[in-house]
Amino acid sequence: MVTLDQTRLPFEQVWLTLADVDACERAIRTMQVRGAPLIGAVGGYGLAFALRADAGDGNLHDALQRLLAARPTAVNLRWALERVAAVVTPLPVAERATAAWAEAGSICDEDVQCNRAIGEHLIRVLPRPAEAGRALQILTHCNAGRLATVGYGTALAPIYLLHERGVPIHVWVDETRPRNQGASLTAFELAERGIAHTVIADNAGGLLMMRGEVDAVIVGCDRVTRNGDVVNKIGTYLKALAASAHGVPFYVACPSSTVDMRLADGLQVPIENRAGDELTHVTGVDERGQVHSVNIMPTAGRVANPAFDITPAALVTALVTEHGVCDPSVSGLEALAKRRQ
Ligand code: MRU
């Protein structure tokens, strides 16, 4: 499979060819591919590659565990791996690799349909600016767009759809320290489509909401637990608090594959701790276009880098899934789970 190396964006567009399970595992672990739905899709292909080499039960088990360990927080990876494994396990060994490949392809095809559906459902609930002609103001955190998925994105899906339909829209893009997925990736993909946007420091959102400059917040998610808690990129929780304080709707674009009914609440979700150099260093280009990474802190300082946080269900206006709007509660998620069966 071929995919953009997201560690090189926005400065260079380098296409990666992933041709074995090792390459898929490495791409997920090093965040050459990232975003919950995309790592699920790459994980599915990773398992298919592993089975091409050896489709026996031992290799199926080992490859699944290796891929699963590549990133701990987004449940889509587990969902995709278990989905492929469930299809191939009852089959004769000789048929497994082909079946795994087909299932990985279905996961990708369905992701695009799912994201479009999420976009359509979100459009129905988003506020409509009172004054005709004023752009709808959306704030988003991290990157839950085309780059994080197979197509359209989740949180950005309604933005793409509204833009395609000629609705004026402007996006406030949180820079999303420490890896800057907003400044590097969301801004990149919105610019590619000519969608008006402004990158802001992560701490600016509260002021904008207080001043009435945000109509709605839309974020993606890496895992939603049975009670409706939302685990997403670090900083999401503070945006939800600010949105709640200022009466701004806070929507979570949530493919049903991101719901984990096995966990009762967000505190049970494993939160990925990433390397400190994501905080101590920033990467950019100089005036000659050369990419550099520079240290911005005293080298002896201690840093902590939890990559995700938990937004309590009470702060979420609605989860918006491919099946429609879902209340962030046990009863809402149980009803959604029934639709998935
Ligand atoms: O660490 P990342 O860049 O993989 O984190 C991505 C996010 O937090 C996204 O918001 C989430 O995966 C949803 S993507 C549709």
Image (cartoon, rainbow, N blue to C red):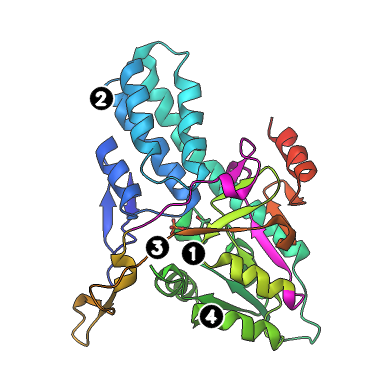
Image quadrant holding the N terminus, namely top left
- Left or right: 242 with respect to 14? right
Do callouts 3 and 2 mark residues in contact (Cβ within 8 Å)? no
Q: CA distance from mark 4 to mark 1?
A: 17 Å
The residue to which callout 1 is attached is 143
The verdict on label 1 being within 8 Å of ligand 1 is: yes
Earlier in the chain: of badge 2 and badge 1, it is: 2
For disc 2, the neighbor class at 10 Å (few under 14, some 14 to 19, many from 20) is few
Give left or right: position of 258 versus 33.
Answer: right
Going from the N terminus, do you reach mark 3 or mark 1 first? 1
In-front residue for pair 55/335: 335
- Residue type (three-letter) at the residue carrying disc 4: Asn
Tell me the crowding category of disc 4: few under 14, some 14 to 19, or many 20 or more residues within 10 angstroms, Cα based.
Answer: some
Among numbered discs 4 and 2, the one appearing first in the sequence: 2
Q: Nearer the observer, disc 4 or disc 1?
A: 4
Nearer the camera: disc 2 or disc 1: 1
Residue that numbered label 4 is attached to: 203
Mark 4 or 2, closer to the camera:
4
Q: Residues within 10 Å of mark 1 (few under 14, many from 20)?
A: many
- Are dots 3 and 1 in contact, CB under 8 Å? no
Q: Position of residue 3 (x, y in %)?
A: 34, 52
Point out the stretch of residues depicted in magenta. 245-274
Front residue of 188/310: it is 310
Q: Tell me the residue that label 2 is attached to.
A: 53
Dot 2 beta carbon under 8 Å from ligand 1: no
Is 57 inside the magenta-drawn segment? no
Residue 104 position within the rendered picture, expressed as x and y whole percent measured from the top left: 44, 35
Q: Which residue is mark 3?
A: 305
